[in-house]
Image (cartoon, rainbow, N blue to C red):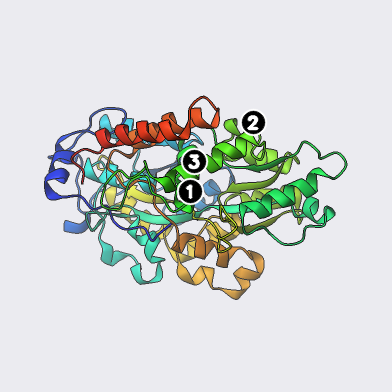
């Protein structure tokens, strides 16, 4: 992906967005008073006392113990972690519902970076003071994910770029020693593994192909890797193009040829990881968080590499979606001063290093990718840094939830071989044009 830029909306379109609720769940507070006492970029936050921190499921089980360090130092301002679903779509829906009801149950919320614009436009989160955070130490592409109309609303606390996990043990048994640089390399490696006793039916490659946000990510990566886009940085719908068609056809053909197994249509992150660790996949695309979990399960039986290029003329690799999460203060939080101090602690370089070493979460700080000791421990860091720096954003629109759902509705039948890529992209183009009207 190209470096992520801030959402660019014309003044008239932005005004319309602020007057109209664009989320999938319906309306919300779009203008006027934001709720409780504010502050942020225009003043000091008010209110001290207990707060909540809200995120998706903690697969590592290590986030709550980390938060106890804050609680020990702040006995009168303790943070309670609220875990939501493991699915990004359901996480967003829970947070939208909390905002629409103006509930103070959620205080500091961990947003998928693609939802920052939506929450900022509806004034569901407070603006933050950029000067209070070390912008110059953070990867530029990652810093941009927290901005809406050039104002910081959600401070990045973890980045993400897709990487390729591969079964080094099986490939070496089959005589394959180099990690793949292209899909053709993966096909050759998989055929070699299928020649081993007991592995004739092993799946070659998997990603998140179930009908949820992960599917949008994987399709977006395929389209960008083929040179296409879904929505341009200027907000124009450009998905009905030869390049986008090539990307979608690559996925369709992979299912037809049994390169991607049929069961991958049920894969979310954890289902795919389970298949990879159970010898049902040779290659698996996932986020860096998997590294520590698979290390516990497989030891040195696997390796990690950049996403491969779709074709033989792309040895430099494919294009990742720019993932990651940002923390923001709910406009309806009572103890915003405590929440703001917590965010500064939670997004510090010290905590970022702990998240890397304890949970293998991708850091936001440039220095952590260049630390020799960390590279010895996590040899994929340089490749991950390159993945993030060259990553492309998913469609940058305020009503992203609706756009993502439309993408899933259009492409999932293609992977099931129930629709053609050509018609799917034509229909998707029309739907996205309708959904994004007035946002350019």
Chain-order first, disc 2 or disc 3? 3
Image quadrant containing the N terminus: bottom left
- Disc 2 crowd rating (10 Å Cα; few below 14, some 14-19, many 20+) is some
Disc marking residue 95: none
- Judged left or right of residue 140, residue 291 is right
Which element is circle 3 on?
A: helix
Which residue is label 2 attached to? 263
Distance between the Cα atoms at labels 1 and 2? Answer: 20 Å
Q: Are marks 1 and 3 in contact (CB under 8 Å)?
A: no
Q: Is residue 423 left or right of residue 60?
A: left
For marks 1 and 2, the one nearer the N-term is 1
Q: Is residue 334 visible?
A: no
Distance from label 1 to label 3 (Cα)? 10 Å
* Quadrant of the image occupied by residue 205: top right
Q: Residues within 10 Å of mark 1 (few under 14, many from 20)?
A: many
- Image coords of residue 40 (percent x, y): 22, 55
Indicate the secondary structure of the residue bearing disc 1. helix
Q: Residues within 10 Å of mark 3 (few under 14, many from 20)?
A: many
Instruction: Give the residue displayed 49% in from the left and 39% down from the top.
Output: 214
> At numbered mark 2, what does the secondary structure look like: helix, strand or loop?
helix
Front in this rendered view, residue 297 or 416: 416
- Which dot, 1 or 3, sits closer to the camera? 3
Q: Residue at x 60, y 58 (%)?
A: 312
Q: Which residue is mark 3?
A: 248
The residue labelled by disc 1 is 221
Query: Residue 244 location in percent, x, y?
Result: 43, 45
Residue farthest to the bottom, as pictured: 372
Label pair 2/3, CB-CB below 8 angstroms: no
Residue 56, position as x, y percentages in the image:
47, 40
In-front residue for pair 193/385: 193
* Spot occupied by residue 194 in the image (x, y as percentages of width and height): 79, 43
């Amino acid at each position: 992906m190209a470096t992520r830029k801030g959402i660019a909306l014309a003044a008239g379109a932005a005004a319309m967005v602020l007057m109209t609720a664009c989320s999938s769940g319906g309306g919300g507070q779009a203008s006027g008073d934001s709720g409780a006492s504010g502050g942020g970029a225009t003043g000091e936050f008010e209110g001290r006392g207990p707060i909540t921190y809200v995120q998706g499921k903690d697969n590592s089980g290590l986030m709550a113990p980390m938060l106890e360090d804050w609680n020990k130092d702040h006995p009168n301002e303790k943070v309670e972690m609220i875990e939501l679903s493991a699915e990004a779509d359901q996480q967003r829906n829970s947070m939208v519902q909390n905002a629409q009801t103006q509930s103070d149950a959620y205080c500091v919320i961990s947003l998928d970076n693609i939802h920052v614009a939506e929450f900022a436009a509806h004034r569901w989160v407070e603006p933050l003071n950029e000067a209070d955070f070390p912008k110059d130490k953070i990867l530029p592409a990652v810093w941009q994910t927290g901005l809406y109309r050039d104002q910081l609303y959600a401070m990045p606390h973890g980045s993400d770029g897709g990487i390729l996990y591969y079964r080094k043990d099986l490939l070496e048994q089959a005589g394959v020693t180099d990690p793949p640089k292209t899909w053709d390399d993966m096909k050759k490696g998989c055929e070699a593994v299928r020649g081993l006793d007991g592995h004739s039916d092993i799946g070659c490659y998997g990603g998140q192909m179930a009908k949820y946000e992960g599917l949008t990510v994987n399709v977006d990566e395929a389209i960008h890797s083929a040179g296409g886009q879904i929505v341009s940085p200027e907000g124009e719908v450009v998905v009905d193009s030869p390049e986008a068609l090539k990307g979608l056809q690559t996925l369709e053909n992979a299912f037809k040829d049994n390169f991607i197994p049929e069961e991958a249509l049920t894969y979310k992150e954890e289902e795919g990881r389970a298949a990879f660790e159970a010898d049902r996949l040779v290659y698996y695309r996932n986020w860096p968080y998997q590294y520590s979990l698979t290390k516990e399960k497989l030891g040195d039986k696997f390796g990690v590499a950049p996403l491969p290029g779709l074709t033989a003329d792309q040895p430099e690799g494919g294009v990742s979606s720019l993932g990651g999460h940002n923390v923001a203060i709910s406009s309806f939080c009572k103890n915003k001063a405590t929440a703001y101090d917590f965010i500064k602690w939670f997004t510090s370089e010290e905590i970022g290093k702990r998240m890397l070493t304890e949970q293998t979460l991708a850091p936001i700080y440039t220095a952590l990718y260049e630390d020799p000791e960390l590279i010895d421990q996590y040899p994929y860091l340089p490749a991950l840094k390159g993945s993030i720096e060259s990553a492309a954003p998913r469609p940058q629109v305020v009503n992203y939830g609706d756009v993502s759902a439309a993408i899933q509705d259009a492409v999932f039948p293609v992977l099931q071989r129930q629709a053609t890529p050509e018609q799917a992209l034509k229909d998707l183009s029309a739907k996205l044009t309708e959904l994004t009207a007035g946002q350019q």
